[in-house]
Image (cartoon, rainbow, N blue to C red):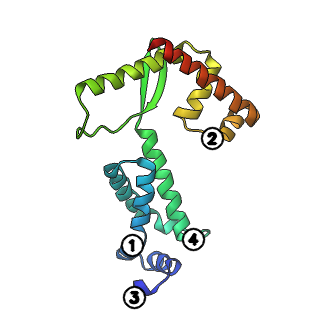
Amino acid sequence: MAFLLNDVELVTSIQTTKNLQLIDELYHRFNKKVYAKCLSMLKNKLDALDVCQDIWLRVSINIFGFKGQASFATWLYKITSNRCIDFLRQKKCRYEIEGVKYHYYCQQINFVGDYTLDNLWQHENNLVQMAQSLEKMALHEREILNLKYFERLSVKEISLKLQLNESAVKMRLQRARKKLSKQLNKVA
């Protein structure tokens, strides 16, 4: 019976009958898309599987709050995007040198392939050099680079946050990147 219903009818049926077994039908209809979205955002198969499983748990809990103001697919897409963003925020690591905190996103290291202790040491050394180079820059330059690359804000979001027009943000980003590149070349 469930396979004959469209998405709205299926969700309505789940809400009225409280039959959570019908969520299996939604799972079969949408799981490949949810997983693909997770994989595209997280870039790691195991993380995507974990987050995907968590999303379906959230759907089964929150399905009774679905109001139908948007399509079920849109609602599910929003849950998927938000959960992936939350996951990335949780994985955000912090690096501190002399009391100045720097943020970067952890890379998943699967000890398969070319990862050796030397590679890991080089990665850590690169982070130290980056942090030291950032430390030598003016506060406003560090701030704009942090907003763009570590908080992953768009130019428009940065312009709103810093109360600058978008062209000013682009120019400041360009100048800060050039200065950082020069600093890194001095260290190397």
The label nearer to you, 3 versus 2, is: 2
Is 171 positioned to the left or the right of 70 in the image? right
* Amino acid marked by disc 3: Met
**CA gap, disc 3 and disc 1:** 13 Å
Q: Secondary structure at mark 2?
A: loop
The label nearer to you, 1 versus 2, is: 2
Image-quadrant location for residue 61: bottom left
**CA gap, disc 2 and disc 4:** 27 Å
Out of 142 and 76, give the one closest to the viewer. Answer: 142
Residue 115: x percent and y percent? 26, 33
Of callouts 3 and 4, the N-terminal one? 3
Q: Going 53% across and 70% down the picture, which residue do you hit?
A: 72
The numbered disc on residue 154 is 2
* Above or below: residue 14 compared with residue 135: below
Q: Is residue 25 visible?
A: yes
Residue 158: x percent and y percent? 66, 35
Of callouts 3 and 2, the N-terminal one? 3
Image-quadrant location for residue 110: top left
Is 116 positioned to the left or the right of 20 in the image? left
Query: How many numbered circles are shown?
Result: 4
**CA gap, disc 4 and disc 1:** 16 Å
**CA gap, disc 3 and disc 2:** 46 Å
The numbered disc on residue 110 is none
Label 3: how many Cα within 10 Å (few below 14, some 14–19, many 20+):
few
Of callouts 1 and 2, the N-terminal one? 1
Q: Which residue is mark 4?
A: 71
Question: Disc 3, disc 4: CB below 8 Å?
Answer: no
Q: Secondary structure at mark 3?
A: loop
Residue 56: x percent and y percent? 39, 62
Q: Which residue is mark 3?
A: 1
* Amino acid marked by disc 1: Ile
* Above or below: residue 4 compared with residue 96: below
